[in-house]
Image (spheres, rainbow, N blue to C red):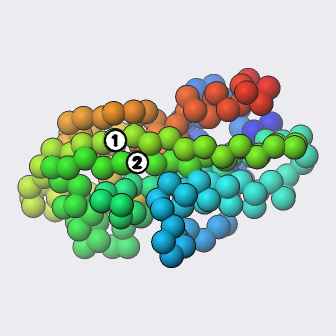
Amino acid sequence: MLVLASASPRRQELLRNAGIAFSVRPADVPEVSLPGEPPLDYAQRLARDKARAVRRQVAGSDLVLGADTIVVVDEHILEKPADTADAARMLRMLSGRTHQVTTGVCLIGDGFEDVRAEITEVTFDRLTEEEIAFYVAHGEPMDKAGAYAIQGIASRWICRLDGCYFNVVGLPVPLVYRMLREHGRQ
């Protein structure tokens, strides 16, 4: 059985839609970058830490999947916004620009720990202050890395996507499926 070390409803929906059976056991891991830690390393470390934390709690034959998605613009990590002003600030940073969405993924099972990442480039149209205010007031940005959900209202402003769409939603499903196959589980 696959155990998802995440409470994310988006990750759960993506796995269900792909026909991958799983159970959920959220990990309680602080999401804080280390001084000087590159964004890719940060995402992979958090995915690994989440998977390890849950692996200690489950049966030996279970596989544990940890994941962490970050938004990066100019080497700055955009986490979930602290408040509406922070969400508006992030959206202004993304407006009219290309940024990277990185998801670190860690699969742990008996005798192995496989850590990888997927990076997708996303380009936003230029946003007006009115559009930013509308979107922030809607509330959708508040629990999303980078203050947007590609599968929601923000889809109207995504003018280019280079890479895995599902990665931007929160889990690179094709990568996860390949990892499961490589470890004899699909």
Residue where numbered disc 1 is placed: 121
Image position, residue 8 (x, y; %): 55, 51
Is residue 7 in view from this perspective? no
Image position, residue 12 (x, y; %): 58, 42
Q: Residue furthest right?
A: 60
Q: Secondary structure at mark 1?
A: strand
Q: Is residue 128 left or right of residue 2?
A: left
Q: Is residue 158 left or right of residue 181?
A: left
- At a point 75% along the width and 57% down the height, the residue shown is 52
Q: CA distance from mark 2 to mark 1?
A: 6 Å
User: Tag 1 or tag 2, which sits nearer the N-term?
Assistant: 2
Location of the C terminus by quadrant is top right
The amino acid type, in three-letter code, at marker 1 is Glu
Image quadrant where residue 182 sits: top right
- At a point 35% along the width and 64% down the height, the residue shown is 76
Q: Which mark is residue 101?
A: 2
